[in-house]
Image: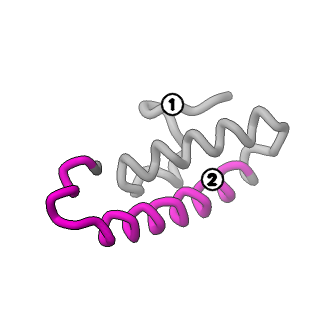
Amino acid sequence: MPWTTDRYPVSMRNMEPWVRDKAIEIANALLREGAPEGTAIRIAIAQARRWAYRQRDKRAALPDSDMGRWH
């Protein structure tokens, strides 16, 4: 069953909402490709955390005047 921002795995509950949204997106894509639920959750959480880390790096590299365009 696909997850939403209102219904998601318990293991994602402590994630920041913007990172959790990415994890949900990744997990749903993995489910569509036939991955088992547990595998999809684990991979999605790991990938979303990596994505968030890269996003934070991008934000840190921006001049202060550009920060308003980011989350």
Magenta residue check for 58: yes
Specify the segment rendered in magenta: 40-69
Residue 3 occupies which quadrant of the picture?
top right
In screen coordinates, is 21 left or right of 29?
A: left
Residue 28: percent from left, percent from top: 66, 36
Q: How is the image coloured?
A: one colour
Q: Residue furthest left?
A: 65
Which residue is label 2 attached to?
A: 44
In screen coordinates, is 41 left or right of 61?
A: right
Which residue is label 1 attached to?
A: 4
Q: Is 66 above or below relative to 53?
A: above
Label 2, residues with CA under 10 Å away: few <14, some 14-19, many ≥20: many
Label 1, residues with CA under 10 Å away: few <14, some 14-19, many ≥20: few
State the residue in front, 19 or 51: 51
Which mark, by number, is residue 55? none
Instruction: Name the N-terminal-most of marks 1 and 2.
Output: 1
Residue type pointed to by label 1: Thr
State the residue in front, 27 or 57: 57
Residue sitting at x 71%, y 49%: 40
Residue 4: percent from left, percent from top: 51, 31
Q: Are marks 1 and 2 in contact (CB under 8 Å)?
A: no
Q: How far apart are the alpha carbons under marks 1 and 2?
A: 14 Å
Helix, strand or loop status at disc 2: helix
Residue sitting at x 60%, y 63%: 46
Residue 35: percent from left, percent from top: 81, 44
Residue 27: percent from left, percent from top: 65, 44
Helix, strand or loop status at disc 1: loop
Residue sitting at x 38%, y 48%: 18
Residue type pointed to by label 2: Ala
